[in-house]
Image (spheres, helix red, strand yellow):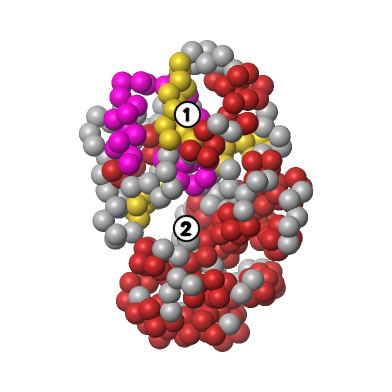
Amino acid sequence: MNGSPIWHYGPFPRVYVGPLDIEKIKKIVEYKKVLILTSRSFLGSETLNKILTTVTILKSQVVLVSPNPTWLDINQHKSNVGDFIPDVILALGGGSTLDTAKILSISMNTKNQLSDVGNGSELALETRTIPLILIPTTAGTGAEITPFASIWTGDGSGKTSIETIEMIPDFIFLDASLLSTLSPEQLLYPGLDAVSHALETLWNKYQTPVSSRWAKQSLELSINCLPSILDGNRSKETLTDMLLASNMAGIAISDSHTAIAHSMSYPITSKYGVPHGLACSFTLPSICHQLLNEECVLIPESDLVKQAGLMLSDLRLPQLVRSYMSLEQCLDLIPLMNTRSRASNYMGRVDENSLESLIQASFKT
Ligand SMILES: [Fe+2]
């Protein structure tokens, strides 16, 4: 094992896998004041209706979350919630909804406006006292289990991330039926994010015996199920595997964090709007090749990593990226790609030359 000899993992919430167990939810929220966070598309959904019609809730308030929330949005939600102090917070949605719920769950007692304060802020020192239930409706970000929440600054400078284990929820429900109506893109981009999280753990200096095992398990699942899903397979088993791959990769990065591919992706998303899952994955085959074949760095599960690289090469991701930006535009972003907190986790070389050759190689494929 490389990296710090001091490491930790957990805590773990109770994770329920399978058709949404309304009786279980009922036990947690019945006769309680519930703050519900969801997106516009899930507001009138069968799932939410089923919860609301089956469970007797003392009082509820709904927060509608838009994609890519900013700190301004978070403050607006907080002021809309006003004096309503819930007994339970329940979030049903994608990464944006879950991250917003996580931030609100630790800031219900904070009277101040929340701001773009980043990691290590006072917000990260808050204690969560309200039980939190997270139900993801996409598979890939792992947001339901990570201690991170990423919020856009709103000034075009990208995202800031809050990290605290207080945001790890108490209950997670992984129900594959929530994914069955997603478009191929809505399945592809988060799915790629999960693959990226697993690979970024395996070539991470700070991986631990636990995080690398979660990453391996995740990758074994996603290598099989992601191409199958993109071929049109929407079986419950396959979609459940993708949810599990996402969840396991989320546990893996919770301890070791991400690395070079994510570091490179941030300016790409911020400047050209390339979806996160695509931005942090189109370079992965080139990173695999450079690390294993050129630099010959020893990493765990190298055969599996190579398999993942081949699977991603078959998806022709650079073609999708080219519709957002050119090779030249991507090369111009190199000075912004070496984020210390992420790139320094990488076991391979990180300098302007290696970043340039990674981008050149990625765009060639
Ligand atoms: Fe990611």
Q: Secondary structure at mark 2?
A: loop
Quadrant containing the N terminus is bottom right
* Marks 2 and 1 close (CB-CB < 8 Å): no
Q: Is mark 2 within 8 Å of ligand 1?
A: no
Q: Amino acid at mark 2?
A: His
Q: Is residue 254 visible?
A: yes
Residue 272 position in % (x across, y down): 39, 67
Tell me which residue sits at (30%, 45%) in the image: 71
Tell me which residue sits at (24%, 37%) in the image: 113
Q: Which residues are magenta?
A: 73-101
Q: Nearer the viewer, residue 240 or 38?
A: 38
Q: Nearer the viewer, residue 234 or 172?
A: 234
Q: Amino acid at mark 1?
A: Ile
Q: Nearer the viewer, residue 180 or 267?
A: 180
Residue 47 position in % (x across, y down): 62, 31
Q: Is residue 232 above or below residue 132?
A: below
Residue 341 position in % (x across, y down): 37, 63
Nearer to us of marks 2 and 1 is 1
How many angstroms separate mark 2 from mark 1 (CA)?
29 Å
The answer to which quarter of the image holds residue 364 is bottom right
State the residue position of label 1.
Answer: 36
Q: Is residue 236 above or below residue 224?
A: above
State the residue position of label 2.
Answer: 257
Specify whether 316 is left or right of 345.
right
Q: Is residue 111 magenta?
A: no
Q: Is disc 1 surrounded by few (<14), some (14 to 19) or many (20+) residues within 10 Å?
A: many
Residue 195 position in % (x across, y down): 60, 62
Q: Is residue 155 above or below residue 324?
A: above
Specify whether 197 is left or right of 216.
left
Tell me which residue sits at (52%, 45%) in the image: 94
The answer to which quarter of the image holds residue 264 is bottom left
Q: Is residue 92 magenta?
A: yes
